[in-house]
Amino acid sequence: MLDDRKLAVLRAIVEDYVSTNEPVGSKALADRHNLGVSPATIRNDMAALEEQGYITQPHTSAGRVPTDKGYRLFVDRLSQIKPLSGAERRAIETFLAGAVDLDEIVMRTVRLLAQLTRQVAVVQYPSLTRSSVRHVEIVPLAERRVMLVLITNTGRVEQRVVDLPEDIADDRIANLRAVLNACLDGCGLSQVPETVADIPDHLPPEDRPVAATILSVLLETLVERHEEKIVFGGTANLAAADFSIGLRDVLEALEEQVVLIRLLGETGGLSELTVRIGSENPYSGLRGTSIVAAGYGSGDRELARLGVLGPTRMDYPVTMGAVRAVARYVGQILAGS
Amino acid sequence: MLDDRKLAVLRAIVEDYVSTNEPVGSKALADRHNLGVSPATIRNDMAALEEQGYITQPHTSAGRVPTDKGYRLFVDRLSQIKPLSGAERRAIETFLAGAVDLDEIVMRTVRLLAQLTRQVAVVQYPSLTRSSVRHVEIVPLAERRVMLVLITNTGRVEQRVVDLPEDIADDRIANLRAVLNACLDGCGLSQVPETVADIPDHLPPEDRPVAATILSVLLETLVERHEEKIVFGGTANLAAADFSIGLRDVLEALEEQVVLIRLLGETGGLSELTVRIGSENPYSGLRGTSIVAAGYGSGDRELARLGVLGPTRMDYPVTMGAVRAVARYVGQILAGS
DNA sequence: TCTGGCACTCTGTGTTCCCGAGTGCCAAGT
DNA sequence: ACTTGGCACTCGGGAACACAGAGTGCCAGA
């Protein structure tokens, strides 16, 4: 049904179209790739490919353009992920190594990805629910007001101001802090809700109302709305790629945290690449854009995801190589700090 | 030289051009604004205005368009800042009031400004050097590694991981923390460098090397590179305003922190509006864009700046009203938390 | 099964033409 | 000294048109 030559033709079409951004015709194909057959033969193959929905022609008598389905086949079976050059690897390493805290790691990763792929980069902070507690701090700010600071093993620092129901002396706060840390230290954040339930038992009765307030705020920070934090950059690359239509839609999608998080997709394996092509992705404003994403993590756990977003007409092998490499390096950096 | 009527003509040209985005001719002016004179007279005035560089015509025999100089005159002398509607004020209030921490305040402010003005919003975090220390926390992470957390009176929380030169027991850390807080509490961050110099005197000699390491990291966070933090949003509005040329340049400028900070400009008075029109602003990629910015702060101190960026052809009275109002509200919210 | 040939179909581009909006200038009116 | 109506002029943008070129589908022959 699809013999080797037809596949070769499809591959050639995708490659040419990606590099020229113009519908590619049978003659051009015969010239630029040595497929060993004449344009007429290629035309026949093209007709078959079109028949089955892998390519399409914008107008009668224009060349062919891959469809989403065509890109999909290309990605799945016709392309090989292209590894980065040595220079690029070194650049990544030195660039990421200079970061001093999580914010900076994430920021630099975004820039790096954007620059490497010339596309829009999207990076998620390590998911709270997949992290564990390293330390909880209670800082008195004023009477009846403290700041709750939560530090995770992944380097995230979340803070919330808490208004207390009553005045409370510093030594009682110190005790509270000690109990909290004793109970929660090392506790996976997804288990925090259960663990927290036991805490009042370890406290003198008079401290329990205050503790309840603080703990409820703590739980709040784990709620979905605050749990995921996501950042993007490199939008200037969008303007360069002539996104004829829909640039507006794309920018809107990017500013919607919720959409963005869904775009990066559900977790695959660690460093496993997910590719969503055009209509495959779950947001209609993004017809015409593809997402290449991967999970990153330290050790064997996936902490969160990162990826890039660009026109369906993108250089998948290169992009996939870059995303995979960056995901791995970020994992390493995170593990080492 | 510029009598009242000529000024009225200029005002009318600006208003019409802003609302229609098309060069405006003498006849249209006579029709839509009742200036009480004939098109011919208006033509004469226009010739004078053009002579002096306030307006220009894209081609012979097209209408006139304001120049940067024309907008400048309009902003300085011909327009009145338009206050927000009651509904808008209430919307701002409720929207900002829901924020639980500084990050959220800033994020919401960006969205608010972008939505209100339909332009790109830019918001700076409260400047560290204009804040003071509320609390310093040292959290043990591992042997020879602690996290230094700095909380300011403006709600900023900065954290840095510090590698120590030697093991150090928890009680010594507690002491260090106590001394640090005693010395620095309430201290303006711009005075921290001097204050810090005295601290080793208050410590037992054996703790001084460790303290030196920690303090040097503390000082690092005050270095310019980390000091300013700035955020933008609403880029989708750029795509809507047909920025014919240069959208790419604008997006690039936005992603350059340094440029962005300079754009918001040097401080004027608190809530004082700064308007930079087209070529007036210090970055060549932003020909064709204007910036409207204001300082915000709690009490009488300016903590940082915020503003919007849009095409020179923007509705200045409305935009200025929105920026000023938001700056004030943010100041209030900050003062209250 | 491949190939060359051929007729056909488009799009994009260049040309020409013309309409209309807008101007500048001038001479007459107030 | 301004203002006004009139008038000739300019120029951009759209419509109509033709045309070249790229690409196709199909068919008959190797």
Image: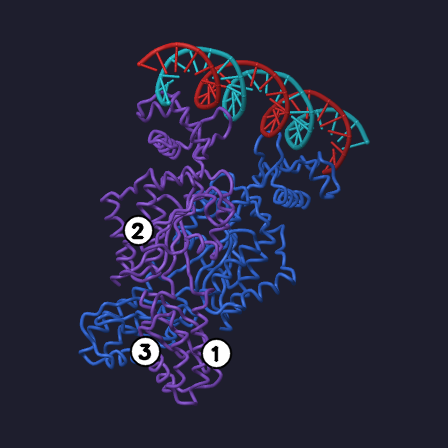
Chain colours: A blue, B purple, C red, D cyan
The kind of residue on which mark 3 rests is Cys
What is the chain letter for disc 2? Answer: B
Position in image of residue A320 (x %, y %)? 57, 55
Mark linked to residue B326: 2
Mark linked to residue A183: 3
Distance of mark 3 from mark 2, alpha carbons? Answer: 43 Å
Position in image of residue A332 (x %, y %)? 53, 69
Q: Earlier in the sequence, mark 2 or mark 1?
A: 1
Name the mark nearer the viewer: 3 or 2: 2
Name the foreground residue: A61 vs B142: B142
- Give a yes or no on whether discs 2 and 1 share a subunit: yes
Judge whether B179 appears above or below B190 on screen.
below
The kind of residue on which mark 1 rests is Asp
The residue wearing badge 1 is: B163
Q: State left or right for residue B171 relative to residue A28.
A: left
Point 48% across, 50% down: residue: B282
What is the chain letter for disc 1? Answer: B
Q: How many marks?
A: 3
Distance of mark 2 from mark 1, alpha carbons? Answer: 42 Å
Position in image of residue B175 (x %, y %)? 35, 85
Judge whether B206 appears above or below A82 on screen.
below
Mark 1 packing: few (<14 Cα in 10 Å), some, or many (20+)?
A: some
- Residue at disc 2, secondary structure: helix
The kind of residue on which mark 2 rests is Val
Distance of mark 3 from mark 1, alpha carbons? Answer: 26 Å
Point 36% across, 52% down: residue: B110
Name the foreground residue: A317 vs A100: A100
